[in-house]
Amino acid sequence: MIHQDIKNKNKKTQKQLFAFQKDRDPLKWFSGLFVLIFLLGILTACNPTSSAVSVPEITPTPTPEPPQPETALENALQRFDEAQSFTVTGSNNAKQSDGDGWTSTSTHYVDQLNQTNIHEFESTFDWDIKHTRLCISANCYSADATGLLKPVKSTYPIYRPVIESLSKNLSEILDSNYTYVGENTIDGMRVFEYEIQVTKEMIDAYTEAPAQDYFTTELIEPYPVVTLYVNAEDGYLVKMTEIYNEDWTYELMDEVTNYQTEYTLENNYSGWNSTTFTIPEYVNIQNTDWQDYNGVYSSLVSFRFPKVYSLSETYDYPTLKTPSGSTMDLRLFMSSIASLSPLDGNERDQETGVAVCYGVVQLWLLPSFTGSPVIESTEWFDMEELDFCKTVISSDDGREVEYLFNEPVDYAWANGRMLPATFWISITPAEGDDVDTIFWDVIQTIQFGASE
């Protein structure tokens, strides 16, 4: 029974299929086949087991190789070009054979990305020196005796380690002149140690002949030794030391003094790419304000000067310096030149004033110049309160402008002086500055006693 039912169903199915095939449109059949194939394609793509999916390969970032002793020092010096910022702290201890000596310390903050740096320096050489210098791109500023940062003729300097004894950039003479000493430890840090032994041949090749001056210096044995330490983990320079010896010879008034000095220098490098600092206040070069002089000569004389001029009193007398580099020294002359003050108090005519001025310069100033000094010009300025003797002198050292003047006679008497004090202004013009007018605006403000 069951078998017969199956046979009947098969016949019925065959009839239905024959009827479908008889009645169907060939175009509809192909359309259906196309839809079927398209659906099968979608199902195959969505089935993760149907075929392999292409996944892009990820290339791992290579791990930087640790510094190697053979190349670490050269690579460390290249880091000074690549680093955004760093800090250098230095010290210099000098011991003289005569028992004297001095120490110097410095801190250098460097921001190479923004071309900005600050250099702070202190020294006990003969007198206590404290100095701050700021450089911002094309402009530099240096602290003067007033404590203000004044513009100076300089631009942003590129910092590079220097062999002080040779005054040469370290990278310029490195080549094969150094020796790898081995590994060492500094404050728990593993470092590579290198040494440069400066030879007589290197000294002859890299140092200039000493200038003929009242003193000369010369490197002597034991010759300089430079030691450098590079971080064995990150490859940055950590420390640099230098020891060298110099022979000093002074010759003054036919008296010769000679002694030797040993220098011990140390520079430590830190804050790589993380150094930050605050830019201090500075006087812009376009500033047109003036300021009153208030220094070591304040009890003797007063004057005013442009705020952009820097004031120094290193030698216990005021020195002014313009941003272009011209300098003016104001000193008490070694003795009183009475002839600069008319005894009768009357004004001098130009002819008499020039004659007196010329004679004073020949007698008192020319002997202090070396070589063959020549008086180019002489002038006499009869001002309301003061008389000025001005002369321009050419010598082997170039051109200088000299002013000689006395304090008022009545002012000298009021202060217990029988003869008036003589003052000497010596001006060295920078190239391009007008010899005839440089600092004349300042000189005209000079006063003695309280102004009315």
Image: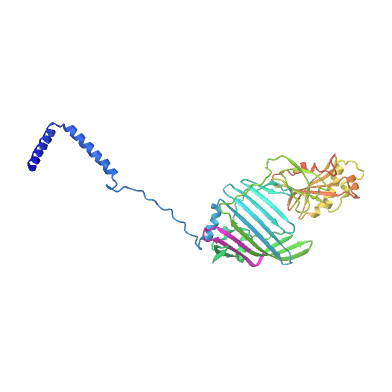
Residue 61 drawn in magenta: no
Q: Is residue 237 magenta?
A: yes
Residue found farthest to the front = 1
Observer able to see residue 206: yes
368 or 257: which is nearer to us? 257
Task: Identify which residue, 357 or 80, lies in the foreground.
Answer: 80
Residue at (60%, 61%) from the top-left corner? Answer: 240
Outermost right residue: 344
Compared with 242, 403 (above or below) is: above
Q: Give coordinates of residue 322: x percent, y percent.
A: 71, 45
Q: Is residue 363 left or right of residue 86?
A: right
For residue 380, what is the image quadrant? Answer: top right
User: Along the line of sight, which residue is nearer the eye, 191 or 45?
Assistant: 45
How far across and how far down the image is residue 142, in percent? 68, 49
The overriding secondary structure of the stretch rendered in magenta is strand
Colour scheme shown:
rainbow
Quarter of the image where one finds residue 100: bottom right
Residue 26 percent across, percent down from the top left: 16, 33
- Where's residue 88, x and y in %? 61, 56
Q: Residue sitting at 51 percent across and 60 percent down?
A: 233
Quarter holding the C terminus is top right
Q: Residue drawn at (9%, 42%), measured in percent from left and top?
A: 2
Q: Is residue 261 above or below residue 361?
A: below
In the image, 61: left or right of 227? Answer: left
Q: Is residue 165 visible?
A: no
Q: Quadrant of the N terminus?
A: top left
In magenta, the rendered stretch is 219-242
